[in-house]
Image (cartoon, helix red, strand yellow):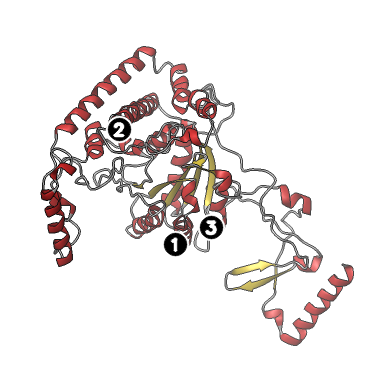
Amino acid sequence: MAIWFARSRNIVSSLRQNLGLSKILFKRDYSHRPVFKNSQLSSTVFLGPVKSLRHESTAVEKQPDLVQLSDEEDAQLELDFPGGKVGYTSEMKFIPESSSRRIPCYRVLDEDGRIIPDSDFIPVSEKLAVRMYEQMATLQVMDHIFYEAQRQGRISFYLTSVGEEAINIASAAALSSDDVVLPQYREPGVLLWRGFTLEEFANQCFGNKADYGKGRQMPIHYGSNRHNYFTVSSPIATQLPQAAGVGYSLKMEKKNACAVTFIGDGGTSEGDFHAGLNFAAVMEAPVVFICRNNGWAISTHISEQFRSDGIVVKGQAYGIRSIRVDGNDALAVYSAVRSAREMAVTEQRPVLIEAMTYRVGHHSTSDDSTKYRAADEIQYWKMSRNPVNRFRKWVEDNGWWSEEDESKLRSNTRKQLLQAIQAAEKWEKQPLIELFNDVYDVKPKNLEEQELGLKGLVEKRPQDYPPGFHV
């Protein structure tokens, strides 16, 4: 090895003299940087910011670079490439595929709803805390009622957020109403927080004339221009590149807002996830990416999704500041999202949040999750790791909530939901012609032909269509 190093020095010296490489090699002082041994390199975890060519963050403490110095001469030299200056080493060393230590998970509340000593979090007022809990409980009741309505055949499809209520409500509470949300499909709580009524939820699920989507979307595919909430789209991860574009447009318009988009762990296997993160990082778009790592992509476990340490490390690979947070801890989610939102807007940069949680419910009403996971596993997360119960304990311990408040809230919410469902059922369905409207400014001939063909089919076999269906 010593002979090899000596030859390397001779080669460098010869290149300097004969090829004028002194114009490429630059002096650099590494005296202020620590030297890590090989064993330290494989076990040290760094998740600091990647320095931008256009700005430098003041919100995060700088982390030391991992520089492997093999001899004194290497420490004084670096190479200049189109991508930037980089030091070099004469030792061949590959970056480890993963660290031996996992990225820690930020949390504030323990499982009993008590503040962990010396926790770093953003305080919430009594008013905000009570509203957060009320909305989490309302989301629970809404999921239960609509799920039962689907099982009764009153709506065709439903998908619950059971186990992920804290991510829904706490993230919504941390955002500004001007922030543009591009959801996946398990974020109705964000829309609930922004003022979408129970009647509006019911109208969408029933696809009646009051549905803003005119009955052309599956149930739970909510959307609201008024609440800056993009309509849910069935294809997985398509909203991530769109969010990068929305964030970039907000930046160009100098708006005091950011784009916020949600994705499940399974969605990170889609190419759109990587395209969205890379675009946002390169363009320095103010986007907050929130990944709900709930352990299952329908029936596919995370162990079959990726070999990396979850999702949080993928952000660092793209040059995006990232954090892993306990998604069942409402205070931790609120603090992380609010801080991420502040970074995105003030520093004009994307941020990635991996929220660790568990999907207690089936993936949807078309799924039976007991076919691929144990019933006692589901029950454990439903009872022992329930985010709603956990936050309720903290609110109650502060003297802000009581059993009487609980009973009144759930009773009133259930009554309102049943009334909303009954009213939604009485509305007429959208006429068939709405299926062909709002597609083109001027309807093309082939679409007109399809419309006439479908009308003829309905008139020929009216028994095949539900009551109230009309052309």
Left or right: residue 296 versus residue 34 is left
Alpha carbons under labels 2 and 3: distance apart: 41 Å
| The one of 68 and 142 positioned closer to us in this rendering | 142
Q: Which quarter of the rendering shows the N terminus? A: bottom right
Q: CA distance from mark 2 to mark 1?
A: 43 Å
Other residues around mark 3 within 10 Å, as few (<14) / some (14–19) / many (≥20): some
The three-letter amino acid code for the residue at tag 3 is Tyr
Based on the displayed image, in which of its 4 quarters is residue 124 positioned? top left
Total labels: the figure holds 3
- In the image, residue 74 sits, relative to residue 224, either above or below, namely below
Task: Read off the residue under disc 3.
Answer: 318
The residue depicted at 23 percent of the width and 48 percent of the height is 216
Q: Which mark is residue 150?
A: 2
Number of the front mark, 2 or 3? 2
Mark nearer the viewer, 2 or 1: 2
Q: Earlier in the sequence, mark 1 or mark 3?
A: 1
- 180 displayed left or right of 393: left
Of badges 1 and 3, the one in the foreground is 3
> Residue 231 in the image: x percent, y percent?
29, 48
Residue 360, percent from left and from top: 46, 32
The amino acid type found where label 1 is placed reads Met
Choose between 291 and 125: the one closer to the eye: 291
At label 2, which amino acid type do we have? Gln
